[in-house]
Amino acid sequence: MYEKDGEKYFVVDSHMHYWNAAPDNWVPGAEQYAKGWIECFHAYQGLGPPQTHWSIEHFQKYSEDDLMTDVFENGYVDVAVFQPTYLKEWYKEGFNTTERNALMGERHPGMFRYNTRWDPRDGDEGLRVLKENVERFGSRGCKLYTAEWNNGSRGWKLTDPGAYRYLEACQGLGIKNIHVHKGPTIWPLDKDAFDVSDVDHAATDFPELNFIVEHVGLPRIEDFCFMATQEPNVYAGLSVVIGGLMYARPRFFAKVMGELLFWVGEDKMTFGSDYAIWEPRWQIEGFVDWNYPESEEFADYPGVSTATKKKILGLNAARLYEIDVPAECQLDAGQGTPAAQDDAQLVSGA
Amino acid sequence: MTNPVTAPSRLLAALEAVRDPELDEPITSLGFVASCTISADGDAQVRLRLPTYFCAPNFAFLMVADAYDAVSATPGVRSTEVVLEDHFASDAINGGVAARAGFARSFDGEAVGELHELRADFLRKAVLAGTDQVCRPLVAAGTDPSALAGLTLGQAPPSAALTRLRQRRAELGLPAGDDAPLLIDQETGAPLPGESVPMHLRRAHTTRISIEANTGICRGMLRHRYGTSGLGEEDT
């Protein structure tokens, strides 16, 4: 919990990682990709305040103690949601798998949620593993990388028939939240891998699932906004938005937030630190202090209140993950309903 | 071997016409040109660099290919070499461009199509963003947004943003002459009916913010990666 000026903010970090990207985990023959990947992540950290930068060695492999200190002790986070990233073509044991996250998290009861993942190209065997992971780890969410390599295939879409089988399975297994990585990525080479139209169709066809678009489709925020405004069950995952822009490019940060608040709305935006790319502490402190700069440029954006920040930092994600929020951190009457779906028609008919 | 002359202005001028198709800015001002030389005999060498090892290879290929074309077409250039540095697909891109192989052949088995449609998609985004750049100052100065639908390009006050918008529209084959409407559908080129103007302008603004924010991230990553300015780099 974060407390400032008498206000108490319940914090759910809905997008973070516990990875091993050190040389001992690199796949022989794919070392340049494994090395290039983590160096690319490390460059993103360079967009945060200098005093929060890590050495590349520390960044490649941090300890359980580091994570607990950075995220919970110093970072104000109440509950953190692990989002796995496998990348087994480059990392022997995967970059950060459901198992790795859960084995660590089990030593800290109640502090984590373990999301799992699936890939429609894994067919029946993948469905079996998904079911097993849900039973073992209690996963209520999945992280999907539609641009991931898989046996020579360069990517897939949520609208592929194979993906619909998995989405149906998710509904049957009690999974509620589908986090889709739509952000900086590499493959497929000849397509625009940031295309969000597949989320649009899937969200319509699976109204019981929530679709959280991570990194808000950066660098195609506009495509995400125009889609999300028409779908009541589509949410904006703010990882990279706060970490990558708030410190490095504050005016663009204010504009992007203004656009998201206009098109998507404060009930449907969720904070994610993207730890260990960025530590949560400076992001939370900065965001609670944040408002638009004094300028005509920002005059027509929706206002930002304490309730806005409480929803974005934790209450929206707490609703999506059915996490109990202490009474002292809940909103007062009249401050709206976190994660409400009914404001989505704001600009429908556009 | 003859001594190269560093960064001749005519080569740099040619490279200024090469844009990052996604960010719609010259590769020079973005800082992507690490070096550029030409020998006394006219052998030109350009080295390009990008913000990350994993920048999208499709856009990278377009920039390397466009740089190759721009430099080759410069008077006095006898041979051209363009090298993309420090990128996971450097070899495939550099070799493919040098061999004039096209994108699909350069990435045999990994890509099935060329990149014309991708480029056109991003030009349409540039047209939308440019519409905001032209219209926002007009609205701020008191023009009623609904009146914008009645204006032609020739009636809009001259500005660098207007020139740029007209160039982008012309590249797409959209109406760009003095008599063409200021506001058009960026897909079809059809004039916009007055009632759809407010939403069109809203979308245009969002598109511009998205491109500008993305450019900001790319600039920050490039600076973190290299710590030196590229030839012709300008920060905004």
Image (cartoon, coloured by chain):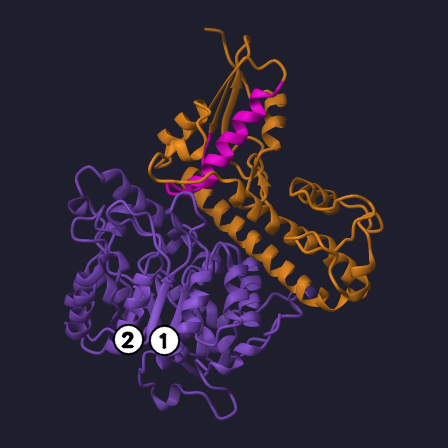
Chain colours: A purple, B orange
Q: Which residue corresponds to the image point at 32% horizontal and 78% vertical from the top-left?
A: A321
Q: Which residue corresponds to the image point at 26% horizontal and 77% vertical from the top-left?
A: A172
Mark 1 or mark 2, which has the lower sequence index?
2
The residue singled out by tag 2 in the image is A175
Looking at the image, which is closer to me, A350 or B156? A350
- Label 2 lies in what chain? A
Q: SS for tag 1? A: loop
Q: Quadrant of the C terminus of chain A?
A: bottom right
- Label 1 lies in what chain? A
Q: Tell me if residue B130 comes above or below residue A159 in the rendering.
A: above
Location of residue B184 in the rendering, given as x and y in whole percent from the top left corner: 71, 55
Q: Tell me if residue A317 comes above or below residue B107 in the rendering.
A: below
Disc 1: CA contacts within 10 A as few (<14), some (14-19) or many (>=20):
many
Location of residue A215 in the rendering, given as x and y in whole percent from the top left corner: 43, 61
Location of residue B97 in the rendering, given as x and y in whole percent from the top left corner: 45, 27
What range of the chain is rendered magenta?
B48-74
Whether pointer 1 and pointer 2 mark residues with C-beta atoms closer than 8 Å, the reply is yes
Q: Amino acid at mark 1?
A: Leu
Location of residue A335 in the rendering, given as x and y in whole percent from the top left corner: 51, 87
Q: Amino acid at mark 2?
A: Ile
> Which residue lies most toward the right here?
B155
Disc 2: CA contacts within 10 A as few (<14), some (14-19) or many (>=20):
many
